[in-house]
Image (cartoon, grey):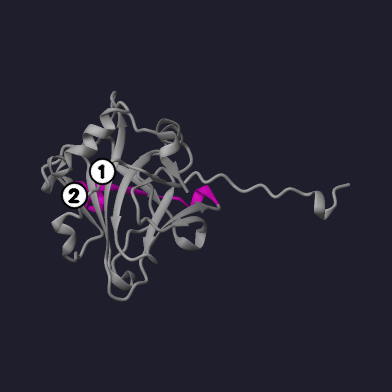
Amino acid sequence: MKTLDTIIVVKKMNIYHRYITVPFEYEKPKKFLESSDSFINNFSHDDIQSDVLVWLSKYDLRISNVVEAFYTSASNKVSVPIHNDLTIKPGVRDAAKLNFTWGPSESKTRWWRVRDESKLIEIIHEDSGYNQGLRDAGIIPDIDCHKCYSANEEDLELVHEATIDKPSLLNVGQLHSTHNPNPTEDRWTLSLTLLTNDGKHLTFSDALHKFGELTYE
């Protein structure tokens, strides 16, 4: 029989987030000095710093032309809602993004797990307005982004959260959202979808393997 002093507590694997050391500094885009009435904006691929692309190419990676800028206002009045970034259900297959965030230290990215898969909500992007935003930006997506999944917070459990104040790898195959309680300072994120050279999503686990000791918690 096990006694209390022989029971080993195993920490759950963090499958959601890692900081990553990059050999350059990403300058805050001028657009991010403004406020926004939308939580999502689209950037041109041509606006991305070239040193990011050169660095990723050394790992046989590139970025999608769907480049997103996420906004979370002071006091959380505008925030990124709970969603995943794939067209398949959370947990089936993960995907990695490289994010650069500017904002207060108490702002968080949060990850969620649905208690009952039947509670997942399918979001069709043609109906949500997301696809229209891509068209307005002149972007023909090189990845499948016609839908995603969401859920109501009461049907979820919070499984991880992190302050994204350094370059970071995020698992966006899982449900996630943002939170910014700071009363005066906004938060902006530039989000780059990582792709292999054959156009497939780089999984979060493959990203950790590929970047190795450059990643840390």
In the picture of the structure, the residue carrying the numbered disc 2 is 42
Q: Amino acid at mark 2?
A: Asn
Q: Amino acid at mark 1?
A: Phe
For this rendering, which residue is in front, 52 or 169? 52
Mark 2 crowd level (few <14, some 14–19, many ≥20, 10 Å Cα): many
- Expressed as whole percent of the image width and height from the top left, the position of residue 159 reads 52, 54
Closer to us: mark 1 or mark 2?
Answer: 1
Total labels: the figure holds 2
Mark 1 crowd level (few <14, some 14–19, many ≥20, 10 Å Cα): few
Q: Horizontal placement of 136 versus 127: left or right?
A: left
At a point 81% along the width and 53% down the height, the residue shown is: 5
At a point 26% along the width and 34% down the height, the residue shown is: 55
Q: Is residue 125 magenta?
A: yes
For this rendering, which residue is in front, 63 or 115? 63
Tell me, yes or no, if residue 89 can be seen here: no
**Figure check: 102 above or below 216:** below
Measured Cα–Cα span from mark 1 to mark 2: 23 Å
In the picture of the structure, the residue carrying the numbered disc 1 is 24
Who comes first in sequence, dot 1 or dot 2? 1
Q: Horizontal placement of 65 versus 61: left or right?
A: left
Task: Please report the bounds of the magenta region as a residue range.
Answer: 116-132
Asked which quadrant contains residue 85, the reply is: top left
At a point 29% along the width and 71% down the height, the residue shown is: 74
Q: Secondary structure at mark 2?
A: strand
Q: Residue furthest top?
A: 198
Q: Horizontal placement of 3 versus 66: left or right?
A: right
